[in-house]
Amino acid sequence: MDPEAILEALDPEQRLAATSLVGPTCILAGAGTGKTRTVTHRIAYGIAKGHFAANRILALTYTSRAAGELRARLRSLGIPGVAVKTFHAAALSQLEFFWPQLAGVPAPQVLTSKAKVIAEAAEEVGVRFDAALLRDIAAEIEWRKYTMRSIEQYEASVANRPVVGSLKPEQLVAILRAYEAIKIKAQKLDWEDVLLLTLGMLQAEPRVLAHVQQQYRFFTVDEYQDISPLQQALLEAWLGDRSDLCVVGDPNQTIYSFTGASSSNLLHFASTYPDANVISLTRNYRSTGKIISLANRIIRGETSMEELESQGEAGVSPVFFDAQDSATEAAQVATEIKARLARGVKPNEIAVLYRVNSQSELYEKALSEQGIDYQVRGGERFFNRPEILQVIRLIRAEMIVPTDKPLYQIVTDAARELGWKSKSPDEGGAVRDQWEALNSFIAIVDELPNGSSLEDFVKEVDERIRSQHEPVKAAVTLSTIHAAKGLEWDSVFLCGLNEGLLPISYAKSDLAIYEERRLFYVGVTRARKALSLSYSKVNSISGRAQARSRFIDLVQSS
């Protein structure tokens, strides 16, 4: 592979980052500036130049989807064999490998969800709960562990934490203790335990540490602004006294401080590594000029980062509208989405974003009434769907007897046994939903290199199941802004922009309000071509009047 050919697709700043191979490197990449392209080309260039060995690279991402995308892009550049994982997946693979050697038994299984255990713990303590309270308690569990606090240390500081529902501090601490006891009795781990135990293992076992440090020499860390103290400690253990580290991040997209994340490691990278190469990417290739202009106004005066420069057309101005109540707001959004679908906009290029999960119900109802297919990010796992489990079993059965059938035919034949047809059904509801899921599964074939075998396909599916890298469904996306991080759509509806939601009601301090501004910025920068911002005068559920978000005043008056 010609190293210089790898660089041809990059702009000057991206090229500078991609050729920075020696020593620590920090890439400050604003929204839509091509950070994934830059990182993949840097890895490919380093391998082509003989500076990196593919099997000694560990690329760490924040989400499974990002890991899947990075792997796919490396594969398109002809670069196989690079380990691309989330922090949790990397730690789990090490824990599962070394635990039997150290303890003589397999590593404990990881909980699929905290909710059931938290619910049991709450019942044990005598606390009434609902889904919202369970989510809030889960967030406290994660914050405690990501900040590496014992329960005793958490108890000493809980009075300074945001109030969780109507729980008294002593009730919350009791639930956290019960949660740990139930989990230990069941011999289960949560994902934060995986990180903690892996770190403890590396610190306690020099042999294991040496093995891991020998395995991986070159590190790339994406979304470095959202790294937690626990993840940073684990990264430092993997690195040892070496500095072959490339970090990528954007301080303006720091939105996970509630988990203990902090942008300080990114902002102080040059102080930690005085010989670091620091490169800024500011050319935005995602959004139109008018969307970027609005985005820049959101964070102006609150950041040391350079403003984004749109590389696209000016485009249409973002649209602001209000509604009498939140149900009417949802209905208006659904009506506009239907109009855009009629004009030929693809459903998977439309997203409705909001601040909290509970807001999705109104939009699910409104879209259903218009006959519009949708998917809720964070809902049922794709690979856990019954029809997907069935089609995978059928395909695995095909591997028993050799066949000359093309891969696409094998996969579609299996899907046809479950009722899939090449033409989409006229029906809506469950029938359409199942067809969309099977169709998305079949589309995985198109993402593989030409000439891929059935074994290659099964291997890809297995990897996607492990990493929860789900295919894109042909449906409108409903998502919280947090869950939309790293994604983009042609049309974005940013809804429920009211005081108490964005900024959230418990954001009281200047720092908390600034994080809510950054969250607003993240929501805005998900849009490529069209952006609608809406709010309502009355909450339809509570019947209470509500003011529009101060952030709307901020961008409209600037």
Image (cartoon, rainbow, N blue to C red):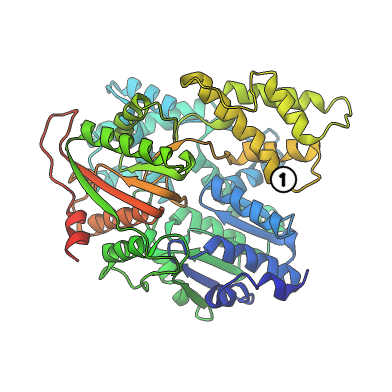
Q: Which residue is under mark 1?
A: 448
Please determine whether, in this image, residue 527 is positioned above or below residue 473.
below
Please determine whether, in this image, residue 131 is positioned above or below residue 512.
above
Q: Position of residue 277 (x, y in %)?
A: 53, 78
Q: Is residue 57 visible?
A: yes
Q: Position of residue 199 (x, y in %)?
A: 56, 51
Q: Residue at x 65, y 18 (%)?
A: 418
Q: Crowdedness of circle 1 by 10 Å Cα count: few (<14), some, many (20+)?
A: some
Label 1 sits on a secondary structure element that is loop
Q: Residue at x 88, y 25 (%)?
A: 401
Viewport quadrant of the N terminus: bottom right
Q: Residue at x 30, y 25 (%)?
A: 130
Residue at far bottom of view: 275
Viewport quadrant of the C terminus: bottom left
Q: Which residue is at the front of the view, 482 or 557?
A: 557
Q: Which residue is at the front of the view, 395 or 112?
A: 395
Q: Is residue 86 visible?
A: no
Residue 539, quarter of the rendered image? top left
Residue 366, quarter of the rendered image? top left
Count of labels in the image: 1
| Amino acid of disc 1 | Leu
Would you say 495 lies left or right of 254 here?
left
Please determine whether, in this image, residue 124 is positioned above or below residue 248.
above
Q: Which residue is at the front of the view, 179 or 256?
A: 256
Q: Position of residue 436 (x, y in %)?
A: 55, 29
